Image (cartoon, rainbow, N blue to C red):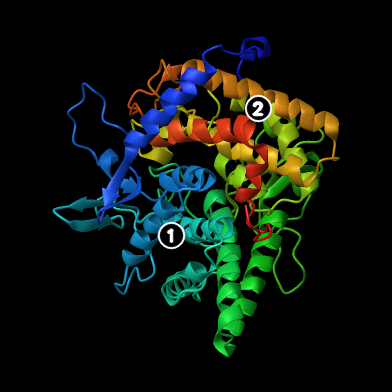
Amino acid sequence: MPTNFSQERLRVRPSSKEESVVQKAKEQFERTLVLARGQLVGSVAALEHPRSSEALNYGEVFLRDNVPVMMYLLLQGRFEIVRHFLEVCLDLQSSTYQTRGVFPTSFTEQNGNLIADYGQRSIGRITSVDASLWWPILCWLYVRRSQDRDFGASQKVQRGAQLLLDLVLHPSFEGTPVLFVPDCAFMIDRPMDVWGAPLEVEVLLYGCLKSCCHLMELAQQDRSSRLLEQRLVLTRQWIHNLRSFLLKHYWVTSKTMQVLRRRPTEQYGDQQHQNEFNVQPQVIPDWLQDWLENRGGYLIGNMRTGRPDFRFYSLGNSLACLFGLLTAPQQRALFRLVLHNRSDLIAQMPMRICHPPMEATEWSNKTGSDPKNWPWSYHNGGHWPSLLWYLGGAILLHEQLHPQADVLLMGQTKAMLEECYWSQLNQLPRQQWAEYFDGPTGTWVGQQARTYQTWTIVGFLLLHHLLRVNPGDVTALHIDGPTTAR
């Protein structure tokens, strides 16, 4: 599994062009902003390449792609755009029976009308789950940052949150507190054998439920009701059960793996099972021993009966830190793991979305021979610069909340983050802010990558803001932080 990429080649030098690169990126970001109903509403997925005439959906406003956009606008104090974005998404929340409560994957305005996509136009026709789970999180972070309590407590917002809760917390044939989804239902939107309870979706569900609770608490302060109190109790219990489940079944370290390898199998009956999902020791990959080292830890990608997915997913693990799902010591174990496996996860273009990639027969069988998810490309081991700010935010938030904890480790982690920042600053402008990068070291621009990708541009600007402009603003990413004035 480990590549032969030398650690020495990871070292990068600062650039004297930092100020000009940042200024140019800001100008390009402003060009991504578009109008809806006569007001700025958010960013298109990518700017058209000067020589490209392809008509693709990169000119639409994607909820998923606008997560970093909205966070950047919040840090700039441009609250009116964020509120308008939230309101438009709320107006487009699905009301049809089968998808009631779902937020749109994307939308665009044509001839004065808003046209939303709930998956009916997507490749594979899969409804995006992460878009719906992100909306309450963005809404609550907006309310916290802007102090717009009236919006959070409004009947319109409360109804939208209740519709979503009705959708994700409804009874099902599955007894666990996770949300089951099909393949391709989140950022990894092409076949990658991630069906079931993929980490990113479950962590987003955790953040979504916490945000919904905070929003309901606002409404409760204005108009207390028995029904609202019951919904709060139910949601808080679900949050507790979900976190306990994920930490029990997804969190792995060298110590937990030794226990897992020796657990009994084929258990039946009412007694407390030590191996609830009947995981056979043979499915534990050989590379895991060196990957974890002695003090590293991470959340695995999925837990299905007899089929755990031990791949590392960068976004899910980073969000688990930002949302407070992982404890402080577990977050530091994750940082140690990233440092130890830096050549795999960071390489030339930080950072890899998923590791290790599927190759050969496994790639063919599990992706349907998807040419875009070729080994070491796109979601199958590709490098996405837009993911770095999530990890950077997790590191910087941890430092803010736990300033005295393992100073040596955090110093090494911050130094790595600085080098990653310089690496992106030196490379991304001349590589036209590409969507993703291919190969074991992330050196080549992705074979089908769009250029001038919005979340590549704004992800860099977010990291620059948190490292250079105002490091204290990282608390704006903290879901459970106090609702205080800026």
Which callout, 1 or 2, points to the residue nearer the camera?
2
Q: Is residue 26 above or below residue 119?
A: above
Above or below: residue 195 compared with residue 457:
below
Q: Which residue is mark 1?
A: 132
Kind of residue at disc 2:
Leu
In the displayed structure, does residue 379 sit left or right of residue 342?
left
Q: Position of residue 333 (x, y in %)?
A: 76, 39
Q: Nearer the viewer, residue 451 or 486?
A: 486
Whether 165 is drawn above or below 369: the answer is below
* Residue 484 spot, x, y in % from top left: 66, 59
Which residue, given by chain and number where applicable, does mark 2 sit on? 417
Q: Residues within 10 Å of mark 1 (few under 14, many from 20)?
A: many
Q: Residue at x 40, y 39 (%)?
A: 367
On the image, which quarter does residue 445 sit in? top left
- Kind of residue at disc 1: Ser
User: Percent from the top left, x then y, of residue 285?
Assistant: 65, 36
Q: Is residue 154 left or right of residue 482?
A: left
User: Do we see residue 59 in this rendering?
Assistant: yes
